Image (cartoon, rainbow, N blue to C red):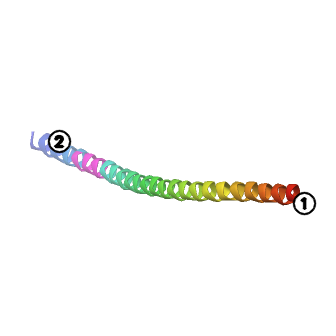
Amino acid sequence: MILVFTLMTTLMGTILKADEATCREVLKKCDLALHAQIEVNKTQEQIIQDQIELIVIQKDQLESQGIWKSIAIGGAVVIVIETLVLVLRK
């Protein structure tokens, strides 16, 4: 009877240690996955911020190009009108 009890205690101790090791391994893998996901989220947030900055820069460039395009067209119209006025005067 004592032998059976000792044998069962030894087997249960071994099983419990194996379960604990398995649990620790699973927890370690979960921890690594969590840290990897946190890094992915940080990278995605940085990408979003960079894209927002790029959109703002492109918007500013388009606005400035629109102003210069209007000025260039206006200048060309003035030159054509002035040329016509000078040609027609003579």
Q: Position of residue 66 (x, y in %)?
A: 62, 54
Compared across the picture, whether 34 is left or right of 85 comes to left
| Residue 2 part of the magenta-drawn span | no
- Residue at x 84%, y 60% (from the top left corner): 86
Residue 12 locus on image (x, y percent): 19, 43
Mark 2 Cα shell of 10 Å, populated few (<14), some (14-19), many (≥20): few
Amino acid on which the number 1 mark rests in the picture: Lys
Q: Which residue is mark 2?
A: 8
| In the foreground, 10 or 71 | 71
User: Which residues make up the magenta segment?
Assistant: 16-24
Q: Quadrant of the C terminus?
A: bottom right
Residue 90's mark?
1
Quarter occupied by residue 88 = bottom right
Q: Nearer the viewer, residue 35 or 79?
A: 79
Dots 2, 1 in contact, CB < 8 A = no
Which residue is more in the foreground, 82 or 22? 82
Which secondary structure is most common in the magenta stretch? Answer: helix
Snapshot quadrant of residue 60: bottom right
Residue drawn at the location 9% of the way across and 43% of the way down: 2
- Quick one: SS at disc 1? loop
For the point 54% across and 59% down, the residue is 57
